[in-house]
Amino acid sequence: FPDAPKTIPFKTYTCEQLVSILQGRVGAQSFAKPALELIARRVATRSGDARNALELAASSTIKCLEALTEKQDLAVSEPDADTPNTVSLPLVKVPHVFKAVRDGDGLEITQNIQSLTDAAKHVLSVATAIGNCIKEHQKSNTKININHEWIMAGDLLYYCTAVPSNGLLDHVDFAQFTDLIEQLI
């Protein structure tokens, strides 16, 4: 078929390649490096498609702009400048990426959860329960023995193995456990 359109397959990009693409397209100044790395990790583990990384970067930028207060004009200053009503660089940070992911298509989230292994679903369930407990304790001003909103991977592994899981995590070492966590990010 000489007139048939040709399909050109592209290899998926690695996390490092996606970071480089994002830095080239959106600039290293407007995005905090951890935000770019989060976008790249998320896309590299799912599709490796640079278009998806750029779409997530665009959504993160929108979330950042929505978070600006009305008092803040869009005048941008270099970090540590003492100019009132300006925003310092970088503008887009990790919380904006999380908001863009969270506010994304609900169907995608459902499909992602359904595609997880049973062990990853168990880890997600335990982590969600811990997060909900922390939020409830913070609302009620009850003192709990957690000084931050983050939980260490080793602690999460401990809690996940303490909750009955029908042997899902019986033979999972720490490296394998961190791989399960990467599936959830």
Image (cartoon, rainbow, N blue to C red):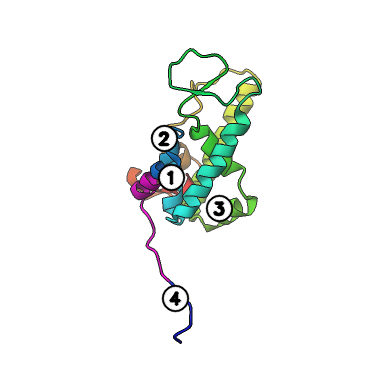
Towards the viewer: 181 or 50: 50
Residue 8 sits above or below residue 26 on the image: below
Label 3 vs label 4, nearer the camera: 4
Residue denoted by label 1:
25
Check contact, mark 1 vs mark 4: CB within 8 A.
Answer: no
Q: Which portion, as a residue range, is magenta? A: 8-21
> How far is disc 3 from disc 4 in space, using C-alphas?
35 Å
> How far is disc 1 from disc 2 in space, using C-alphas?
16 Å
Residue 131 sits above or below residue 118 on the image: above
Of labels 1 and 2, earlier in sequence is: 1
Residue ID at (62%, 50%): 105
> How far is disc 1 from disc 3 in space, using C-alphas?
30 Å
Q: Label 1 is placed on what type of residue?
A: Arg
> How far is disc 3 from disc 2 in space, using C-alphas?
24 Å
Q: Is residue 15 magenta?
A: yes
Q: Label 2 is placed on what type of residue?
A: Pro
Disc 2: CA contacts within 10 A as few (<14), some (14-19) or many (>=20): some
Q: Label 4 is placed on what type of residue?
A: Lys
Towards the viewer: 26 or 107: 26
Question: To which quarter of the image does residue 61 belong?
Answer: top right
Of labels 1 and 4, earlier in sequence is: 4
In the rendering, which numbered label is found on residue 6? 4
Residue denoted by label 3:
113
